[in-house]
Image (cartoon, rainbow, N blue to C red):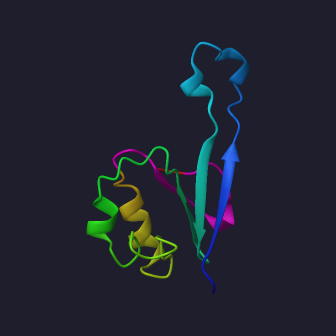
Amino acid sequence: MQRRHEVHREINPFEHLCESFVLLCETEKQIKYHNDEITVVWKPEVCKHSGRCVTQLGSVFNTQARPWINMQGASAEAIINQVEKCPTGALSFYRNENIAEPKS
């Protein structure tokens, strides 16, 4: 299966309440990486580049490669386990058969 990624922007539903809080009202960039089982969602604006994903699962997370997330680099469970260790919540996932809110 080919690796794919998509860029999505979500509009803050509370934008009308945020005139004084401009930072809370910005759209949030999300880049999605798929394989047959799961989708990993990366929010680059949230990421603080702690490097845990790169150092702990380099077969999937490689900042020198493009795309930098290789969804074929490990099992879905190994990827999920690593995503759940993201300290900022910049990485989340959902199972493709149950498309809903990302889990972090």
In front of the other: 8 or 104: 8
Q: Report how many numbered discs are placed on residues in the image.
A: 0
Quarter the N terminus occupies: bottom right
> Is 36 located above or below residue 29 in the figure?
below
Percent position of residue 43, x then y: 52, 50
In front of the other: 1 or 65: 65
> Does residue 95 show up magenta in the picture?
yes
| Left or right, 73 with reference to 50 | right
> Is 8 located above or below residue 70 in the figure?
above
**Stretch in magenta:** 87-102
Residue at coordinates 36% horizontally, 52% vertically from top-left?
86
In front of the other: 80 or 64: 64
Percent position of residue 66, x then y: 50, 75
| Left or right, 7 with reference to 77 | right
Farthest-out residue, left: 55
> Does residue 96 show up magenta in the picture?
yes
Farthest-out residue, top: 20
| Left or right, 90 with reference to 9 | left
Residue at coordinates 64% horizontally, 38% vertically from top-left?
27
Percent position of residue 69, x then y: 47, 71
Query: In which quarter of the view is residue 6 placed?
Result: bottom right
Residue at coordinates 62% horizontally, 48% vertically from top-left?
101
Farthest-out residue, bottom: 1
